Amino acid sequence: MGAAEKDSGARSFSVIFAQLADGDANREVSQELYDLVTKLYADAEHRGTQSKGSVTVKLSVSVDPRGVVGMAWETATREPKPQRIAGILWMDPKTGNLMTQNPRQPTLPHVIEGGRREVIDEATGEVRSVREV
């Protein structure tokens, strides 16, 4: 490579990448970007706020003494994490176990067919009928 050729400047990266592997690299990254943007849009609509992700392209380059350049690519896509709703549990002050019902909140009677009411005895776990007063 002569001095005049070296000083002519760098060839456009976008042109080189578009031609890499007969265009396969460009097609693959373009599809990954399209898929990511589609998922981000759906996620942003669902959440009602901005959604973020990324596509990372890594190029590995090798050059041999004859000037033959090998170029391989890898992509990594980071999609938004799913939004999860936190659950609420209560600790039983007597046993320390987790419960789905607040142990400090009284249980209301359940109305059963025929107007009969039943409650669960928290001490024994038995179902008991409640008489109306």
Image (tube, grey):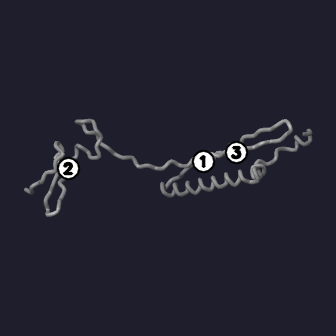
Real-space CA distance between mark 2 and mark 1, rounded to the nearest whole angstrom: 50 Å
Dot 3 falls on a residue whose secondary structure is strand
Query: How many neighbours does mark 2 have within 10 angstroms: few (below 14), some (14-19), or many (20 or more)?
Result: few
Query: Pointers 3 and 1 in contact (CB under 8 A)?
Result: no
Q: Can the viewer see residue 14?
A: no
Residue underneath mark 1 = 77
The percent position of residue 41, horizontal first and vertical second, equals: 55, 57
Which of the two discs, 2 and 1, labels the residue nearer the N terminus? 1
As shown in the figure, which amino acid type bears the numbered disc 1?
Thr
Real-space CA distance between mark 3 and mark 2, rounded to the nearest whole angstrom: 63 Å
Query: How many neighbours does mark 3 have within 10 angstroms: few (below 14), some (14-19), or many (20 or more)?
Result: some
Corner quadrant of residue 115: bottom left
Q: Residue at x 58, y 46 (%)?
A: 78
Real-space CA distance between mark 3 and mark 1, rounded to the nearest whole angstrom: 13 Å
Left or right placement of residue 28 versus residue 89 in this view: right
Of circles 3 and 1, the one toward us is 3
Q: Residue at x 82, y 44 (%)?
A: 10
Of circles 3 and 2, the one toward us is 3
Corner quadrant of residue 63: top right
As shown in the figure, which amino acid type bears the numbered disc 2?
Thr
Q: Residue at x 7, y 56 (%)?
A: 133
For residue 107, the mark is 2
Dot 2 falls on a residue whose secondary structure is loop
Dot 1 falls on a residue whose secondary structure is strand
Q: Residue at x 60, y 55 (%)?
A: 35
As shown in the figure, which amino acid type bears the numbered disc 3?
Trp
